[in-house]
Image (spheres, rainbow, N blue to C red):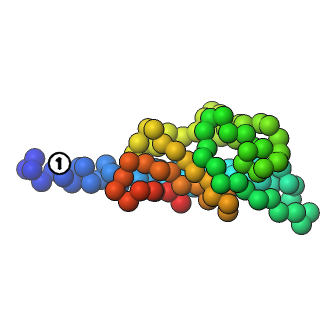
């Protein structure tokens, strides 16, 4: 029985961690969009170019938008901290030029997130 249960438990645990990480990336992407809207205002026809950056506790909005406030990105997050990746606690959240966030974890497929 244990020989069957352990692999199933491991697969379920890995899947849950990946889904949590994907949820974290979606939340961060949403917050990046909020930051962009707050910095450029809404409906004025301007567009902000998001810089490709690795997020850390010290990343500023100026670094993210290549111009903007010196407030930290984490000021938009609950508890003012980046979420911890459940796959690899030495996580790195990366933002691309579209504002999409991915998390590089220690996985076979390299990246996970949305």
Nearer to us in this view, 61 or 25 = 61
Residue extending furthest toward the bottom: 45
Secondary structure beneath dot 1 equals helix
The spot of residue 97 in percent (x, y) is: 68, 60
Q: Which residue is mark 1?
A: 6
- The answer to whether one can see residue 68 in this image is yes
The spot of residue 24 in percent (x, y) is: 53, 49
Nearer to us in this view, 48 or 37 = 48
- Horizontal side, residue 15 vs residue 53: left or right: left
The spot of residue 4 in percent (x, y) is: 12, 54
- Horizontal side, residue 54 vs residue 90: left or right: right
In this rendering, is residue 34 above or below 82? below
Identify the residue shown where x is 83% and y is 45%.
Answer: 68
Identify the residue shown where x is 73% and y is 39%.
Answer: 60
The spot of residue 35 in percent (x, y) is: 75, 49
- Horizontal side, residue 54 vs residue 111: left or right: right
Identify the residue shown where x is 50% and y is 51%.
Answer: 103
- Horizontal side, residue 4 vs residue 23: left or right: left
Residue 101: quadrant of the picture? bottom right
Identify the residue shown where x is 62% and y is 35%.
Answer: 57
In this rendering, is residue 76 above or below 16? above
Residue 44: quadrant of the picture? bottom right
In this rendering, is residue 18 above or below 45? above
- The answer to whether one can see residue 27 in this image is no
């Amino acid at each position: 029985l244990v020989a069957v249960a352990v692999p199933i438990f491991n697969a379920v645990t890995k899947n849950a961690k990946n889904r949590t990480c994907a949820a974290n990336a979606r939340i961060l992407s949403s917050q990046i969009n909020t930051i962009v809207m707050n910095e450029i205002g809404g409906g004025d026809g301007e567009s902000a170019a998001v810089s490709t950056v690795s997020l850390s506790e010290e990343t500023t909005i100026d670094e993210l938008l290549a111009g903007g406030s010196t407030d930290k990105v984490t000021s938009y997050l609950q508890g003012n901290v980046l979420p911890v990746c459940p796959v690899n606690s030495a996580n790195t959240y990366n933002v691309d030029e579209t504002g999409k966030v991915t998390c590089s974890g220690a996985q076979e497929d390299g990246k996970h997130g949305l």
